[in-house]
Image: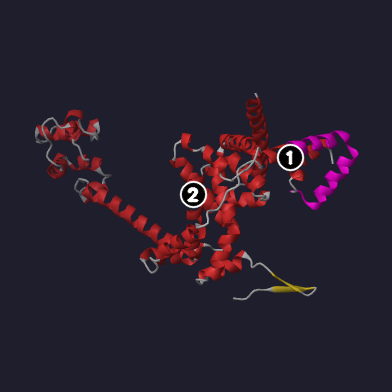
C-alpha cells in the first residue's frame, strides 16, 4: 500500500487516494481500502436512503444492502462511471424498489424527525420543522424529489445527476426548476397551517 | 444577450452550471439591465428559501455497527466464491464474452424457430403429388385435361391421406375450405365418359387441405 504525501512548510499531508485506486485495491481483497471507501460514503448513502424512503430503519438496511451489493459486485464495475455515481445509482434503485413494494401509507415515518438528538427549547420547533420538510419532500413526485435531493442535499452538479439517473442534462434542469417551485409552494402552505 | 435569453439561463447561472463565456455574458447583462437584476434577486431569494427548508431535514445518523454489518454481509455473500454464478459474473464483465453469449442465444433461438416451423409443416396432412403429366398441363386443371380417370385416382389419394372425419365434424359441417372448380366447359366435355357420379362431385368439392 502506498500513500502519497505532500510536503510543504515542514508539514506532511496525506493525499486522499482516489476512488479508482481504492476500488482496485478492494478487488485484491484490501480491507483497508474497503474501510476507507465505506467511511467516505456511508453518511451520504444512509442520508440518501433516508431522504428517499423516509424511514430510519429501512434506510439503514437499504444503505447496508447498497454497500454489500457494490462491494460484492466490484468485478462488474467497469469504471465507465465514477464509483460514487455507481454507488448512488445502486442505492437509488434499491430505495425505489423498496418504495414500490411498500404501501404508500408506510412511506412516511414521523419517528425519523427525532433521529438527531436535540436539547432545550428548540426541540419542539425543530421537530415540527423536520416533520414539515419531510412531508413536503415525500409529497413531491418521485422524479422531482430525486433531482431535488441530489442537487440541494448532496450538492451534485447537473451532469452528475444526469449520469446517476440516466436522463439528459436539460431534463435535470427542468425537473429541478419544477421541484423547487412545488417544494416552495407546499412548504409555505404547511408552514402557514402550522402557524395557524 | 437579450433579456429573454438571460431569464432562461438564470437558474443555471445561480446553480453554477454555465460556461465561463455564458457567465461573463450574463454578468454583463445583469449589470446593465435592472429588470433582469430584479428577476435574479427574486430567484436567489426563492432558491435560498428552498435550501433553508431542505436543511431542516433530519441528519441521518450512521449506526456504530454499520461498518461491521456491511463487512459481515460482504464476507457472507463472497463465501460462495467459485460457484457457477460467480464464474458467470466474472465472464459477463468481458465484452467479447457478452457478445459471444448474445450471438449464441440468437443462433439457438433461430434454430428453435426454424425447427418449430418445420414440425408444423411435417405434421400437416398433405395431398399426394400431382402426376407429372398433370403438372405439365398446368397443375390441377391439367387433371381435367387428362380425363376423369386420372382425376379420380388423384382425388382418391387425397381422401385416403386425409384423417377420417368424425360425425358432426366442423370441417364437414362447414364444407371444404378449398374447392376445386373445374372449368364448366371441361366438365361438360367429360360428362359423357363412363366416370362414376362421385367423380364430378369429388371434383367440385374435393378438399385438399
Residue B88 in view here? no
Q: Residue at x 53, y 62 (%)?
A: A77
> Which subunit holds the residue at mark 2?
A
Q: Is residue A137 magenta?
A: no
Image point (21%, 42%), residue name:
B143
Residue under label 1: B48
Residue that badge 2 annotates: A94
Q: Which residues are magenta?
A: B17-46
**In x, y percent, where is residue B64?**
53, 56
Quarter of the view holding residue A174: top right
Q: Is residue B41 magenta?
A: yes
At a point 57% along the width and 63% down the height, the residue shown is A37
Of all chains, the one bearing label 1 is B
- All told, the count of numbered labels is 2
Q: CA distance from mark 2 to mark 1?
A: 31 Å
Tell me which corner region of the image, top left, top right, bottom left or bottom right, holds residue B151. top left
The one of A65 and B182 positioned closer to us in this rendering: A65
Give the camera-side residue of A93 and A15. Answer: A15
Picture coordinates of residue A93, whole percent (x, y): 51, 49
Q: Residue at x 47, y 45 (%)?
A: A97
Q: Is residue B167 left or right of residue B130?
A: left
Q: Are marks 2 and 1 on the same chain?
A: no
Given the current orientation, which residue lies at the most extreme top position? A196
Mark 2 against mark 1, which lies toward the viewer? 1
Name the magenta segment's main secondary structure.
helix
Please say if the residues under marks 2 and 1 sit with CB atoms less than 8 Å apart: no
Q: Is A179 left, or right, of B33 in this rendering?
A: left
- Tell me the quarter of the image containing the N terminus of chain A: bottom right
Residue B92 is left or right of residue B10, and the answer is left
Q: Secondary structure at mark 1?
A: helix
Amino acid at each position: 500500500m502506498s500513500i502519497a504525501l505532500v510536503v510543504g512548510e515542514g508539514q506532511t499531508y496525506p493525499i486522499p487516494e482516489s476512488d479508482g485506486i481504492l476500488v482496485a485495491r478492494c478487488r485484491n481483497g484490501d480491507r483497508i481500502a474497503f474501510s476507507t471507501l465505506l467511511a467516505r460514503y456511508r453518511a451520504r448513502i444512509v442520508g440518501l436512503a433516508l431522504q428517499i424512503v423516509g424511514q430510519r430503519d429501512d434506510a439503514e438496511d437499504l444503505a447496508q444492502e447498497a454497500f454489500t451489493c457494490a462491494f460484492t459486485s466490484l468485478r462488474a464495475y467497469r469504471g465507465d462511471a465514477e464509483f460514487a455515481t455507481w454507488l448512488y445509482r445502486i442505492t437509488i434503485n434499491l430505495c425505489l424498489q423498496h418504495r414500490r413494494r411498500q404501501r404508500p401509507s408506510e412511506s412516511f415515518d414521523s419517528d425519523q424527525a427525532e433521529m438527531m438528538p436535540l436539547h432545550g427549547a428548540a426541540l419542539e420547533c425543530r421537530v415540527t420543522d423536520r416533520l414539515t420538510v419531510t412531508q413536503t419532500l415525500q409529497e413531491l413526485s418521485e422524479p422531482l424529489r430525486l433531482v431535488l435531493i441530489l442537487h440541494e442535499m448532496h450538492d451534485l452538479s447537473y451532469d452528475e445527476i444526469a449520469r446517476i439517473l440516466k436522463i439528459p442534462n436539460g431534463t435535470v434542469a427542468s425537473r429541478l426548476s419544477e421541484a423547487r417551485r412545488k417544494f416552495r409552494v407546499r412548504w409555505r402552505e404547511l408552514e402557514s397551517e402550522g402557524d395557524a | 444577450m437579450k433579456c429573454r435569453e438571460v431569464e432562461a439561463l438564470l437558474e443555471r447561472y445561480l446553480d453554477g452550471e454555465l460556461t465561463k463565456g455564458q457567465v461573463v455574458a450574463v454578468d454583463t447583462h445583469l449589470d446593465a439591465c435592472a429588470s433582469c437584476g430584479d428577476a435574479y434577486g427574486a430567484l436567489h431569494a426563492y432558491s435560498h428559501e428552498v435550501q433553508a427548508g431542505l436543511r431542516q431535514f433530519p441528519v441521518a445518523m450512521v449506526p456504530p455497527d454499520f461498518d461491521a454489518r456491511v463487512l459481515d454481509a460482504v464476507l457472507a455473500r463472497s463465501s460462495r466464491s467459485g460457484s457457477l454464478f460467480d464464474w458467470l459474473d466474472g465472464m459477463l464483465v468481458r465484452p467479447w464474452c457478452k457478445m459471444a453469449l448474445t450471438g449464441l442465444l440468437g443462433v439457438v433461438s433461430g434454430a428453435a424457430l426454424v425447427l418449430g416451423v418445420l414440425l408444423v409443416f411435417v405434421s400437416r396432412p398433405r395431398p399426394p403429388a400431382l402426376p407429372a403429366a398433370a403438372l405439365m398441363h398446368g397443375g390441377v386443371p391439367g387433371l381435367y385435361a387428362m380425363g376423369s380417370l386420372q382425376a379420380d385416382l388423384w382425388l382418391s389419394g387425397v381422401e385416403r391421406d386425409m384423417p377420417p372425419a368424425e360425425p358432426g365434424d366442423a370441417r364437414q359441417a362447414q364444407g371444404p375450405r378449398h374447392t376445386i372448380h373445374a372449368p364448366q366447359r371441361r366438365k361438360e366435355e367429360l360428362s359423357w365418359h363412363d366416370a362414376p357420379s362421385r367423380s364430378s362431385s369429388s371434383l367440385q368439392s374435393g378438399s385438399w387441405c
